[in-house]
Image (spheres, grey):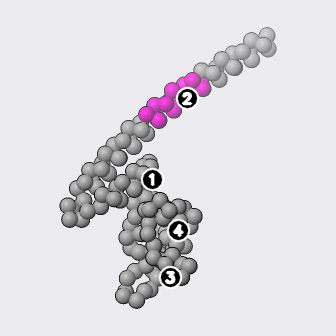
Amino acid sequence: MSKPRAMSRKMSETTFTISQLAREFDLTPRAIRFYEDQGLLSPKRNGLQRVYSKKDRVHLKLIARGKRLGLSLAESKDLIALYDPQSRNKKQLQAMLDAIDTSSMRLEQQLNDIRIMKGELAEARKRCLEALQERKR
């Protein structure tokens, strides 16, 4: 991922456009607007243009990471809400560990289900081949 070029603002606050964030996180602007509609991002406005802050960028980074880890959007939203630097983010980190463990167990179950399905497919294939062989006789 390349770093976005920040928009310049008075007060020297680093800001980003929707297209910069979309490129950085390989998302569509529509997806970013959806996250905004869900209350996960809160850009300022400069006329019709959305202006995203460093905080919005961090939230988007957490959402993207959560997606890669198999977290739902609701789980990511809960994790973002737990951000509390005063407590060194202990609640957020514990919730993240819990979400990772849950996602890991879910994936393990899916792997098991896939192994079972592959076995069933192999057995069905074998029966079909046997039936075809019998019909050739």
Q: Earlier in the sequence, mark 1 or mark 4?
A: 4
Identity of the residue drawn at 39% across and 43% down: 103
In-front residue for pair 10/100: 10
In-front residue for pair 12/123: 12
* Quadrant position of the C terminus in the picture: top right
Q: Which residue is mark 3?
A: 46
Whether residue 45 is visible to the viewer of this picture, yes or no, is yes
Asked whether the beta carbons under mark 1 and mark 3 sit within 8 Å of each other, the answer is no
Distance between the alpha carbons at the discs numbered 1 and 2 = 30 Å
Q: Earlier in the sequence, mark 1 or mark 2?
A: 1
Asked whether the beta carbons under mark 3 and mark 4 sit within 8 Å of each other, the answer is no
Q: Position of residue 23 (x, y in %)?
A: 53, 69
Estimate how packed mark 4 is, as few (under 14), some (14 to 19) or many (20 or more) residues with alpha carbons within 10 Å. some
Q: Which residue is mark 4?
A: 22
Distance between the alpha carbons at the discs numbered 1 and 4 = 17 Å
Distance between the alpha carbons at the discs numbered 3 and 2 = 54 Å
Dot 4 amino acid type = Ala
Q: Which residue is mark 1?
A: 73
Of the two numbered discs 1 and 2 in the rendering, the one whose residue sits closer to the viewer = 1
In-front residue for pair 14/49: 49
In-front residue for pair 37/7: 37
Magenta segment boundaries in residue numbering: 109-122
Dot 3 amino acid type = Asn
Dot 2 amino acid type = Lys
Q: Which residue is mark 2?
A: 118
Asked whether the beta carbons under mark 1 and mark 2 sit within 8 Å of each other, the answer is no
Residue 116 drawn in magenta: yes
Distance between the alpha carbons at the discs numbered 1 and 3 = 28 Å
Q: Earlier in the sequence, mark 3 or mark 4?
A: 4
Of the two numbered discs 2 and 4 in the rendering, the one whose residue sits closer to the viewer = 4
- Quadrant position of residue 61: bottom left
